[in-house]
Amino acid sequence: MVTIKSKKEIELMKEVGKVVAKLYEKLEKEIKPGMTTLELDELAERTMKELGAEPAQKGYDPGIRGVPKFPSSICVSINDEVIHGIPSKYKVIQEGDIVSVDTVALKNGYNGDAARTFAVGKVSKEAQRLIDVTKQSFYEGIKYAKPGYRIGDISHAIGEYVHSQGYSVIREFQGHGIGKEMHEDPGIPNYGKAGRGLRLEPGMTLAIEPMVIQGKPNILELDDGWTIVTEDASLAAHYENTVLITENEPKILTII
């Protein structure tokens, strides 16, 4: 069921969105070579709590038999890891890595979700281009995040732009609605046909999140039950924001 947020709920969504935006400002300043992904996770949790929020992902139960609850406050995925990387004291961030961070903050009963891929130190031109294309694909998609358009219009715009740049999107994971629940209807694929799917209305809040692979779209799941990697070991990037559908232009809630 798709929820249309009231004015009060929208204000609460804006508030938690600011927490996420401030968190990413902090992480972008602090991430550096030699830092472990666990240290990054601990910094993120401290920052969220200082801002009056809780890490919604910590202890998240996917409800899938054999898959453990997610143990950390953020997902940290490096280079060929697409999404859902589990922070570890043994995983050290290196010069030239690209590091994708995905987090959900919970404040006053509402969730804010965003992801960024950071270039650590000096990265290759190819890696930087992948990061840039992934971010731009989000903005290509939200050109259609307006009343009267459909979910498929967003999906189509993202996928077509990514493919035009010579990259792939993964099909097994997608964006989603968000609000009181971390994952709400509707699902938002990063590919598809224009003019299909749910018609957008003011008051909808959507987590739109292109996940882009430099090579082929095939992916593998690691034995931890969470981490998703590219099958051909090519680089991957992730960019996401929580977006409010308004009467006019979309409002990005997780950017200040």
Image (tube, rainbow, N blue to C red):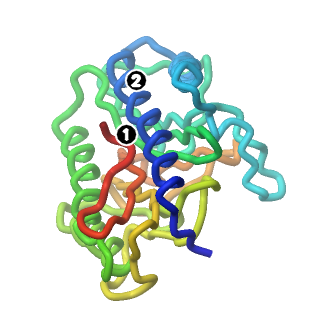
Out of 190 and 93, give the one closest to the viewer: 190
Q: Quadrant of the N terminus?
A: bottom right
Q: Which mark is residue 27?
A: 2
Q: Point out residue 84 in the picture as x, y percentages from the top left corner.
A: 56, 44
Q: Is residue 86 left or right of residue 165?
A: right
Name the outermost residue toward the right.
Answer: 65
Q: Secondary structure at mark 2?
A: helix
Q: CA distance from mark 1 to mark 2?
A: 10 Å
- Badge 1: few (under 14), some or many (20 or more) residues near its Cα, within 10 Å? many
Name the outermost residue toward the front.
Answer: 8
Q: Quadrant of the C terminus?
A: top left
Q: Which residue is found at the position 59% from the left and 64% from the top? A: 184
Q: Which mark is residue 92?
A: none
Dividing the picture into quarters, in which one does residue 58 lie? Answer: top right
Answer above or below: position of 153 versus 89: below
Question: For the residue marked with disc 1, what is the amino acid?
Answer: Arg
Q: Is residue 60 left or right of residue 212?
A: right
Q: Are marks 1 and 2 in contact (CB under 8 Å)?
A: yes
Out of 5 and 123, give the one closest to the viewer: 5
Dividing the picture into quarters, in which one does residue 23 lie? Answer: top left
Q: Which mark is residue 116?
A: 1
Q: Point out residue 175 in the picture as x, y percentages from the top left corner.
A: 47, 61
Question: For the residue marked with disc 2, what is the amino acid?
Answer: Leu
Question: How many discs appear?
Answer: 2
Answer above or below: position of 235 versus 141: above
Q: Point out residue 148 in the picture as x, y percentages from the top left corner.
A: 31, 82
- Badge 2: few (under 14), some or many (20 or more) residues near its Cα, within 10 Å? some
